[in-house]
Structure formats: structure tokens, C-alpha cells
Image: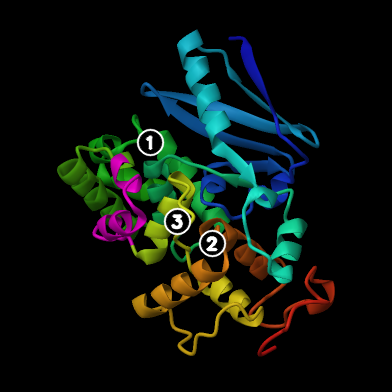
Amino acid sequence: MAIKTFELEMNHSISLRKTFDIEIPALEWIPLSENFYKTLYIINNKKIEIKLTKKQNSSLLFSWKNQTENMNNKIISNITSTFAFFMDKIDVGTNPILLALQKYYSDVCYMKATPFNSLLVTILSQNKTGEATRRAFSNLLYVLQQLSPEGILRTKKIALENAIRIAGPYKVKYLIKSSEQILSYWGGNISQVVELPTDQALSSLIKLPGVSYKTAACVLVFSALKKDIVPIDTHLLRVTQRLGLINIKNKSLTSSTYMQINTCLKSKIPDAGYAHLLFVMLGRDYCYARNPVCNNCPLLNICPRINI
């Protein structure tokens, strides 16, 4: 079968390594080398392997086995919707620290995924590395005939457990029960939920089994591109405190702490939901919990280094 290609021109240089490191939509892709990735699309119950390579600094080349014109158009639509905008396009306000951080990560593209994909990947990522999440989701795609709540429920439990074993087979109960509730409450369409006002969408999502504040927030910022809710983890808590953006005495991530941090960051950063990625990347790259590499950090000369 002939190979179909599609070249996506970006508006400036993109770093695939940084972009595909930790974002929830990026965890749908398996790295084959630094600039070579693959994933699996399930369209009309058909599995199609998509390969991605970086052609030039600002160009991405996708390839797959040629399909019907309608199928090819759906694939191209999926691809183009995945790459939403670059981090230098978000509004971080006027804080010099945030502006410097944004400039450093300007070659990172903020990615977008479908709501159900985001939900599955985020549940699989709970307390697991990106590598484990990638493998589990990839394995899951191969056993499903349909990437939907119906597809989850039509697949044997043992097959689901074997597929996601690297991320924790116990999570199958969350996938099954959440799928049942999505079908029962919303007719299988979670998209209508994420498009609700943020507070309503959040309260609806956290009713699903296995869905915490952070999981719901990730679904909202990466599938509905909500910018008024901040996914909060230990990286973000540590980094924002060291940068002097928040001052939270309680270091345990309780629901009260989530609300405090969310309110505080929204008051200081117009696009706080998107900006969360800047803090997580800095925490993984330089601002470690122990022995942060301050001398190599891009914020060395302006960071207040609180409690370091």
C-alpha cells in the first residue's frame, strides 16, 4: 500500500524533545529517536499507525499507509488540531520571571487531545512515569476496536489489565466505571462536559471514578484549552513557591491547597492554565526537589530562590 504524507508547517522552530516530554497529549506518542515518534489512530474502527519526524526546524512530516480520501482528511484534521500554539503566544502578564521562563521555553508547542483520550492518558499517568504511561496507552490502543467508552466496555477486562499492566492493572476498574458513567450520564459524549463553564466541568469530571482535581484539570486544559484552571502537582507547588509566586504553608496537596494555589496563580497570570506547563518543565529540568541545579537554570539571575 502506498504511503501518504502530510507536512505541517509551524510558525517557528519547535523542540520535539521538550514538547513531547510530559504533556498529556504527548504521552499518546512513542519516541523512536529524538526527532522520530509514532502513534496509533483508531478511525472508524480501523487502526492506522502514524509516524512523525522533524523535517526542518519549523516543519513536521507525518506519514501513514494511504487510506480513502475521507479517512486521510480525518487523519490530517486530527494532526493539525493536536498542535495548538507555542508557549510564547500565551499571556503570562508582566512578571520578569515568567517572561524569562516563557522565552526559554518558546520552542515548546502546547498540545491538544480529545477529551476521552485526555481522560484515559491522565488516569494512566497517575503515580507513573511518562514512559510507563506511553507504553500503557499504546498497548491499550492495540486491544481496543474503538477509542471510546463503548470500546472500553466491549473489551474483556483481562485484555485491558494486560494492556495497561505497566501503569497499574488496578486502574482498569477506573477506566470501566468511568466509561459506564460517561455513557449513563452523558450518552457517551464527554465533549459536552468539558465545554461547560470551568467550575461546572470540574465538578462533573471529579465525580468519575479515579478522577481527582489534577486529573480533571489536565483534561480541561489539554482538551478544552481552559486557561482558568491550573493542574497542580508537586513540581508546580515546589517551583511556584521558590519563585515567590505563591506562599502556601500546607505542602500536602489537599482540595483546599488546590483551590488556594489555583486562585493565587489565576490572579497573577492571565493564562494560568497554560502557564502551568512552564513550571512543570522547569521543575523537571532544573528545579529539582533535592539539589536543584541553580547554576545552570535560565532564571539564575532573577529567581528569588525562596527556601533553597
Residue 75 placement (x, y as % from top left):
51, 23
Residue at image point 29% right, 55% down? 205
Disc 3: which residue: 218
Q: Nearer the viewer, residue 264 or 74?
A: 264
| Rendered view: 100 above or below 198 | below
Residue 100 placement: quadrant: bottom right
Between the C-alphas of marks 1 and 2, the distance is 37 Å
- Write down the region rendered in magenta: 192-211
Disc 1: which residue: 143
Disc 2: which residue: 272
Task: Point out the tag, 2 or 3, that comes first from the N-terminus.
Answer: 3
Residue 165 placement: quadrant: bottom left
Is 276 a magenta residue? no
Q: Nearer the viewer, residue 103 or 231?
A: 103
**Amino acid on which disc 1 is placed:** Val
Name the quarter where the C terminus is drawn.
bottom right
Between the C-alphas of marks 1 and 3, the distance is 25 Å
